[in-house]
């Protein structure tokens, strides 16, 4: 599931200008080319050898983007501070975009005071007329959130020094499955969906929030799921997941986790989000034992990282020798592929996929219907290991109201079936890797 704070993010850098401004340097041209193509994986590999030849403004920009991509949020913000020193060379649009990026970094670090200062800067720069009404509404929502949390302590995950085993229920939901963990507050127990697509806070229904004694600390917070809506902001001093203790958890509190008209048997009223999952560190899912294991001794990080960050967590896979990038979202019951994937693999999808059908997906704010073709099976490779998925829906190309083609930015969304397709997988949202063990 995807629950995001509505931001005013604008990362449309035009670095062709840098190639002209710093003419005569192949290094500048190469770095500019990689930033323009959003190929931060290649940029991170090539940048060390190019650093000495890259102009300082462009180098600072590259450092900020690569660090964000690798979820090194503090490093990214340090580089953004350097970027802002070169405002005359880079221009206002780039500086504005990087300030937006710093806001995402601060959210990921739970540095709400710094995030609030960025929001106040944006609010102060808005014109007073109606042209800024929507932007002001979003910024004021963020201000309420960050103000409420700026005096609260950050999330802390406490755990024993030995291996921690957390039972997981692989529960059938509609046509797919959810990973369910049991959360306890005192004598009250609540089922939570384990959701790597739920960003910056947990998500919970009003009824479940009352059962757990969650304190409401702010109202009228705008978030976007299937559509835009308002939630309350909740705070819980302590809860337990198996043998770990989570302190200072924050929650989006909504009347319903899914729309009332989307009756789904077995659906939970609460979702565990990434601000906790990231701090749980290395997590090993064992299918046969139906559990998560948080090892006492962390394993070695693979040389090639399969995860990356772009305001959400994504995973890189190989499909028929080509790299595909998909959102890592265990709140989705099944993996689905996008219209971008369709355009890339059009011939194969049309040869092997089924007939065009209507498909429904639900989440906060409503349901979405789209045309899909279903592939009977697809094989992905992650870190040299292969997994096979069956009956994978591929979104057909869509259009905006004016007839302009709508092509999604990434190749799809990884669901629970991606995780459970292997006997054992290990992932870590802090050290940024996903590994198939067997």
Image (cartoon, rainbow, N blue to C red):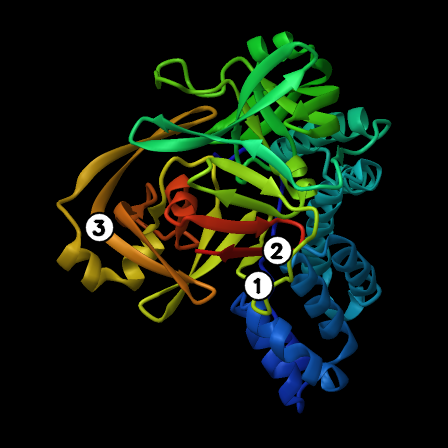
Along the polypeptide, which appears first: circle 2 or circle 1? 1
Circle 3 residue: 375
Q: Quadrant of residue 318?
A: bottom left
Work out whether residue 286 or residue 248 is closer to the camera in this orientation and state it.
286
Q: Which quadrant does the C terminus fall into?
A: bottom left
Circle 2 residue: 432
Q: Which mark is residue 196?
A: none
Along the polypeptide, which appears first: circle 1 or circle 3? 1
Gap in Å between the C-alphas at discs 2 and 1?
A: 7 Å
Q: Quadrant of residue 233?
A: top right
- Residue farthest toward the bottom in the current orientation of the protein: 24
The x, y position of residue 38, in whole percent, is 54, 65
Residue at image point 60% right, 48% down: 311
Q: Residues within 10 Å of mark 3 (few under 14, many from 20)?
A: many
* Residues at discs 2 and 1 in contact (Cβ within 8 Å): yes
Gap in Å between the C-alphas at discs 1 and 3?
A: 28 Å
The x, y position of residue 200, in whole percent, is 65, 36
Residue at image point 54% right, 40% down: 196
Question: Can see residue 119?
Answer: yes
Residue 191 lies, with reference to residue 92, above or below; the image says above
Judged by depth in the image, the label closer to the viewer, 1 or 3, is 1
Residue 246 vs residue 273: left or right?
Answer: right
The x, y position of residue 361, in whole percent, is 35, 32
Q: Residues within 10 Å of mark 2 (few under 14, many from 20)?
A: many
Q: Residues within 10 Å of mark 1 (few under 14, many from 20)?
A: some
Along the polypeptide, which appears first: circle 2 or circle 3? 3
Gap in Å between the C-alphas at discs 2 and 3?
A: 29 Å
Label 3 element class: strand
Q: Which mark is residue 305?
A: 1
């Amino acid at each position: 599931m995807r629950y995001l704070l509505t931001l005013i993010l604008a990362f449309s850098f035009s670095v062709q200008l840098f190639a002209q401004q710093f003419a005569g340097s192949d290094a500048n041209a190469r770095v500019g080319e990689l930033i323009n193509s959003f190929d931060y994986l290649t940029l991170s590999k090539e940048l060390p050898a190019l650093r000495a030849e890259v102009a300082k403004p462009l180098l600072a920009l590259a450092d900020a983007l690569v660090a964000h991509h690798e979820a090194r949020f503090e490093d990214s913000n340090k580089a953004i501070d350097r970027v802002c020193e070169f405002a005359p060379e880079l221009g206002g649009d780039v500086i504005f975009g990087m300030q937006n990026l710093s806001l995402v970094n601060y959210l990921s670090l739970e540095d709400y005071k710094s995030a609030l200062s960025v929001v106040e800067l944006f609010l102060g720069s808005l014109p007073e007329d109606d042209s800024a009404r929507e932007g002001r509404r979003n910024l004021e929502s963020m201000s309420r959130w960050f103000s409420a949390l700026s005096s609260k302590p950050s999330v802390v995950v406490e755990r024993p020094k030995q291996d921690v085993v957390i039972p997981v229920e692989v529960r059938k939901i509609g046509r797919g499955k959810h990973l369910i963990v049991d959360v306890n507050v005192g004598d009250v127990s609540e089922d939570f969906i384990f959701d790597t697509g739920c960003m910056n806070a947990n998500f919970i229904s009003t009824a479940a929030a009352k059962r757990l004694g969650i304190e409401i600390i702010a109202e009228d917070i705008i978030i976007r799921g299937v559509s835009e809506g308002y939630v309350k902001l909740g705070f819980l001093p302590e809860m337990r997941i198996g043998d770990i203790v989570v302190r200072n958890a924050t929650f989006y509190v909504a009347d319903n986790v899914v729309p009332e008209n989307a009756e789904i048997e077995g659906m939970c009223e609460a979702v565990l989000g990434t601000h906790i999952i990231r701090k749980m560190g290395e997590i090993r899912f064992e299918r046969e034992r139906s559990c998560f294991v948080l090892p006492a001794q962390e394993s070695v990080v693979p040389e090639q990282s399969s995860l990356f960050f772009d305001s959400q967590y994504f995973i890189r896979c190989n499909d028929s020798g080509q790299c595909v990038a998909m959102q890592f979202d265990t709140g989705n019951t099944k993996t689905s592929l996008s219209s971008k994937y369709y355009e890339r693999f059009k011939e194969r999808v049309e040869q092997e996929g089924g007939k065009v059908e209507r498909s429904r997906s639900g989440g906060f704010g409503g349901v979405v219907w789209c045309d899909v073709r279903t592939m009977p099976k697809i094989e992905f490779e992650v870190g040299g290991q292969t997994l096979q998925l069956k009956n994978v829906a591929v979104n057909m190309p869509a259009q905006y109201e004016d007839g302009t083609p709508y092509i999604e930015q990434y190749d799809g969304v990884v669901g629970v079936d991606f995780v459970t397709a292997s006997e054992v997988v290990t992932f870590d949202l802090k050290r940024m890797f996903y590994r198939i063990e067997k």
